[in-house]
Image: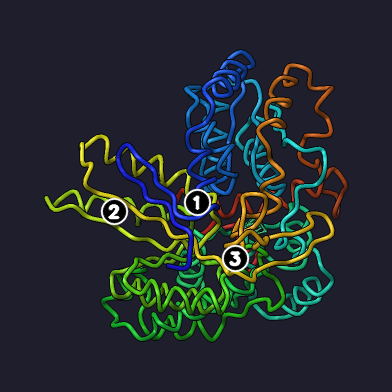
């Protein structure tokens, strides 16, 4: 087989290929390192919220710690858990992710009455994101201006953007933030509450196109099937929504961009029998493959959490029968996800004592997927036999990998001296836009999303702006 893979059993990991070997190695971290970080986090009373895309070494150590205030999740849940940690009385919260994630955590903590709890990143430098950069481009501003001229327009902005981008956009036209977990339901809900709404989605072009494909597919379902996806919709209303939907055409994630043509061909031919998963950010070919698989019950498209739940569901199904089973899964997202998958799958298999079930995670890697970047040198798909390494290749995000274990330990050690960590705080965005700070204006689209998340309906004050 062409791609590296990691076989997960109740008490064993076996790797095929150097990339998978290094992932497996980090899943059994050094006990002295675990003890050091665990003791430090407890002594300093610091909480950690980390994204699934942290590298395997860092996630391996985090998941082995016993400190109760550590949470690894997608960007939507990171902020929720930060609030819970603040309510439980932590002294500070360290965010392991990219800058829009720490900004999001800061904004949500502030809105929840926890503005005195410090939030820290682990690098003094900007921790960017190619999508966040796309939203800051002149092209995006020009596109937003065009959108603002459309009657009843709403900008649905992916959370992977800076607070400043959200604020600037919200000045042009009403804006709500979304994540890959809730974007489809956001579009469906807002159009159910305001059938005339014109939606402008950005900046992720692949996700924008994938959403269009999904909406088109929904128009081919029966009204009853559509009602199961959203009770206030039918074929006509989805067709109307589709005609009122547009997306930005020039933004993509450097990591998910790697799931291109040659990778997809190999997945389709050599791994046709495997379950296919794809994050909403992946390019169309990989997405379409996973959508087809999803329709046939052999895959899933969605967020990192959706992918994790799908795999755990397959483990549950395998546990219902007595035969030995291998569950092959092509992982169509950032490889850092594998740590959470290993931990959860092993916990299930250990609880049931089933040593005859295995999940085989396949990392789809383009052998020639090498790119140069001024800051990082070689980025996704670094030459390493299989076209990848944990140093920044193979569907690993170079920005996420700026979060290191050493840097985390250093920040936690200094967390009782806030003066020493000023450069590690998320940007404050204190400058004003029409009399309000950028932080306030940019936080509003996030709060609109949180309203929808909590109540299942749009915030009336957002609807009033459209
Ligand atoms: S994987 Fe990295 S570049 Fe891609 S959207 Fe996430 S943070 Fe941005």
Look at the numbered disc 1 and give the secondary structure of its residue. helix
Quarter holding the C terminus is: bottom right
State ligand 1's quadrant. Answer: bottom right
Judge depth for marks 3 and 1 and give the one in front. 1
Query: Within 10 Å of the Cα at label 2, are there few (<14), some (14-19), or many (20+) other Cα atoms?
Result: few
Judge depth for marks 1 and 2 and give the one in front. 1
Is the distance from the Cβ of mark 3 to the nearest ligand 1 atom less than 8 Å?
A: yes
Look at the numbered disc 2 and give the secondary structure of its residue. helix
Q: Is residue 235 above or below residue 207?
A: below
Which residue was labeled with disc 2?
A: 313
Which residue was labeled with disc 3?
A: 256
Which residue was labeled with disc 1?
A: 20
Residue 87: % across, % down: 54, 25
Is the distance from the Cβ of mark 1 to the nearest ligand 1 atom less than 8 Å?
A: no
Q: In this view, does 428 lie above or below 381?
A: above
Could you tell me which residue is drawn at 59 percent across and 73 percent down? 206
């Amino acid at each position: 087989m062409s791609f590296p893979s990691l076989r997960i059993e109740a008490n064993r990991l076996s790797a095929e290929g150097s990339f998978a070997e290094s992932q497996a190695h980090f899943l059994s971290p050094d006990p002295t390192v675990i003890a050091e970080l665990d003791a430090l986090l407890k002594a300093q009373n610091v909480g950690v919220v980390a994204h699934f895309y942290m590298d395997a070494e860092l996630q391996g150590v985090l998941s082995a710690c016993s400190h109760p205030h550590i949470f690894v999740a997608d960007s939507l849940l990171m902020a929720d858990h930060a609030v819970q940690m603040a309510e439980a009385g932590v002294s500070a919260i360290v965010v392991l992710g990219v800058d829009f994630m720490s900004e999001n955590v800061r904004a949500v903590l502030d809105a929840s009455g926890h503005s005195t709890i410090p939030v820290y990143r682990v690098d003094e430098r900007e921790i960017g994101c190619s999508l966040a950069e796309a939203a800051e481009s002149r092209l995006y501003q020009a596109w937003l201006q065009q959108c603002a001229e459309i009657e009843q327009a709403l900008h649905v902005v992916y959370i992977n953007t800076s607070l400043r981008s959200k604020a600037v956009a919200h000045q042009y036209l009403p804006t709500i933030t979304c994540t890959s977990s809730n974007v489809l339901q956001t579009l469906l809900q807002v159009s159910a509450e305001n059938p005339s709404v014109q939606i402008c989605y950005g900046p992720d072009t692949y996700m924008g196109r994938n959403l269009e494909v999904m909406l088109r597919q929904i128009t081919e379902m029966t009204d009853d099937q559509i009602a199961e996806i959203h009770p206030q919709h039918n074929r006509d209303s989805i067709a109307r929504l589709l005609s009122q939907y547009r997306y930005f055409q020039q933004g993509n994630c450097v990591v998910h961009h790697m799931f291109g043509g040659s990778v997809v061909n190999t997945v389709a031919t050599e791994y046709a029998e495997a379950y296919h998963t794809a994050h909403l950010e992946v390019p169309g070919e990989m997405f379409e493959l996973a959508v087809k698989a999803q329709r046939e019950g052999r895959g899933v498209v969605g967020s990192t959490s959706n992918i994790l739940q799908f795999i755990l569901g397959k483990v549950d199904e395998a546990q219902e029968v007595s035969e030995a089973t291998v569950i092959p899964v092509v992982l169509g997202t950032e490889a850092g996800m594998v740590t959470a998958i290993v931990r959860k799958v092993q916990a299930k298999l250990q609880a049931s004592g089933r040593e005859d079930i295995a999940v085989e995670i396949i990392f789809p890697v383009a052998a020639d997927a090498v790119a140069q970047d001024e800051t990082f040198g070689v980025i996704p798909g670094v030459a390493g036999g299989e076209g990848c390494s944990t140093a920044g290749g193979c569907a690993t995000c170079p920005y996420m990998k700026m979060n290191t274990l050493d840097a985390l330990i250093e920040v936690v050690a200094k967390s009782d001296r806030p003066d020493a960590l000023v450069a590690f705080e998320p940007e404050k965005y204190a400058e004003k836009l029409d009399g309000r700070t950028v932080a306030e204006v940019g936080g509003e689209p996030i709060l609109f999303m949180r309203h929808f998340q909590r109540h299942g309906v749009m915030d009336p004050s957002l609807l009033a702006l459209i």
